[in-house]
Amino acid sequence: MSQASQIRREVGPFALMLTGLGSIIGSGWLFGAWRAAQIAGPGAIWAWVIGAAIIMTVALTYAELGAMFPESGGMVRYGHYSHGSLVGFIAAWANWIAIVSVISVEAEASAQYMSSWKWQWAKDLYHQMPGGHGELSTNGLLIAAALVVMYFLFNFWSVKLFARSNTAITLFKLVIPALTAVLLIASGFHAENFAVGIHGELHETDFPSILTAVAIAGIVFSFNGFQSPVNLAGEARNPGRSIPFAIVCSILLATVVYVLLQVAFIGSVPREMLANVGWHGINFSSPFADLAIILGMQWLATLLFIDAVISPSGTGMTYTATTARMLYGMERNGTLPKILGRVHPKWGVPRPAMWVNLAVSFLFLFFFRGWGSLAAVISVATIISYLTGPVSVMTLRRTAPELHRPLRLAGLSVLAGVAFIMSTELLYWAKWPLTGEIILLMVVALPVYFYYQAKAGWHDFGRQMKGAWWLVFYLPTLALVSWAGSTTFGGKGYLSYGVDLGVVAVIGLVFYLWGVKSGWRTPSVEAAQLEARIDPAAPLVPPDEETAERITGH
């Protein structure tokens, strides 16, 4: 029995949709509305709508890929299929960093929310700092670490146990945010708050601030949960129907909830607080619970404190499951040790990969000690991870047109182009120097890739580089434009605002076209086609890199 066949296909479409929804509605709902309001004021409502629209275009490209190749950890494999090992490695690394760090941020969210409890020991768990970048104390970090271990244990015994527990948790955490928004609107709504600007002035739509909020306020970070159904495609029944259903429904439902929460937050903040400092100075450790206490709804605050453990924990457990499948997928790309591809014969989960993710989660936990700082880092890494999906799906349309596609999107060439260009804009909106720092983080893992290339005798390295030059040049080009861009987005001002957005869009279009043209028919795709001829009814799951090269002879 192959490793791929040991992964069990036991998750139905509704459970898969709840997995996506459970990933999207995590700590983002507890803090996202507050951070977005700090950055964009009342314009934060538009930030959620714009963010959802952009993520939907990206997600749909991955829906076609996920339905086409229904395998565990698929998000880290698609770039490898379309452009070879180097693009596959960079894309996989970015995706894994963006997802594995979420395990830590969800645990931090729960610990941070505890700091609004009435007891002194709880208040000491978190230390507030200006700009929403407070830090957990040592005791707060220990609580967060214990939660990370709990997420790990929930996933240690089979995907079926995970799916069952996640369904109950997701249903609970969907009800609580919606109830919170309705109650806050009904109990203490101030319509005049929507006229207050970011620094207390009369509100005028500040489009650059809205765009920055989309990139770093936790909006991209929140919607990134759409990846969970794709990464669990190997466990899905009838992936051609269940994956697009799960992705589209989870994004749409979450958008309604998040917009409602943002409206409730803006309308519920006491007017006297805004009069003194504007939206930028509103600093809560437990935003919605603090508002409930201010409005005299102690019972709601208590419910929110309970949900502050349940909502992030549901997301943390989901990401613990998906990140293990990602390392499993990266091993199949041939760029990680084979032990990470081992699946437990009884429980059907890749346990060695889970142990690695547990260790890395602790590193993120102790280097980034507050939700605001870690969520910003995750958001930018997430944006980089989006770049290869639109390029890969169009490349495979060109290089492997005969492969069966259970989901074939109409107008894909336009949709994929828009998704890539908007992802490029998102990366720019995140502001310099954060953009440059995260791009640098993408480069530090390259020695691992070169080690495995040297181990393989630099086999076919020239063709791997030919398929990757577009991405190799793309990342420093974006870093340079971010540095030289308008001061509105943290740059040196060599490009004025407006012109910079146009330049970034053109760069996105050029690299998108270059990327699609650079793809080639890789051994993985050749091997998948050969296996499809032998068993047309079987799921289309390309073998690992070593097997693919042996089957195809190159």
Image: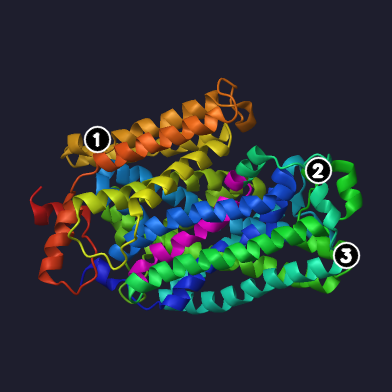
Q: CA distance from mark 2 to mark 3?
A: 19 Å
The residue indicated by pointer 3 is 295
Residue 274 visible here? yes
What residue is rendered at 28% in x and 63% in y? 68
- Give the SS element for disc 2: helix
Type of amino acid at the residue the image marks with label 3? Leu
Report crowding for label 2: few under 14, some 14 to 19, many 20 or more residues within 10 A (C-alpha). some
What residue is rendered at 83% in x and 52% in y? 193
Type of amino acid at the residue the image marks with label 2? Gly
The residue indicated by pointer 2 is 281
Left or right of residue 206: residue 17: left
- Give the SS element for disc 3: loop
Left or right of residue 315: residue 394: left
Q: Are marks 3 and 1 in contact (CB under 8 Å)?
A: no
Mark 2 or 1, nearer chain start? 2
Question: In the rendered image of this protein, does residue 237 appear above or below residue 256?
Answer: below
Q: Are marks 2 and 1 in contact (CB under 8 Å)?
A: no
Which residue lies most toward the top here?
494
Mark 2 or 3, nearer chain start? 2
Numbered range of the magenta stretch:
214-235
Q: Quadrant of the N terminus?
A: bottom left
The residue indicated by pointer 1 is 465
Mark 3 or 1, nearer chain start? 3
Type of amino acid at the residue the image marks with label 1? Met
Please provide percent x and percent y for residue 85: 26, 44
**Depth order, front residue of 186/124:** 186
Q: CA distance from mark 2 to mark 1?
A: 48 Å
Please provide percent x and percent y for residue 553: 7, 51
Report crowding for label 3: few under 14, some 14 to 19, many 20 or more residues within 10 A (C-alpha). some
What residue is rendered at 35% in x and 55% in y? 411
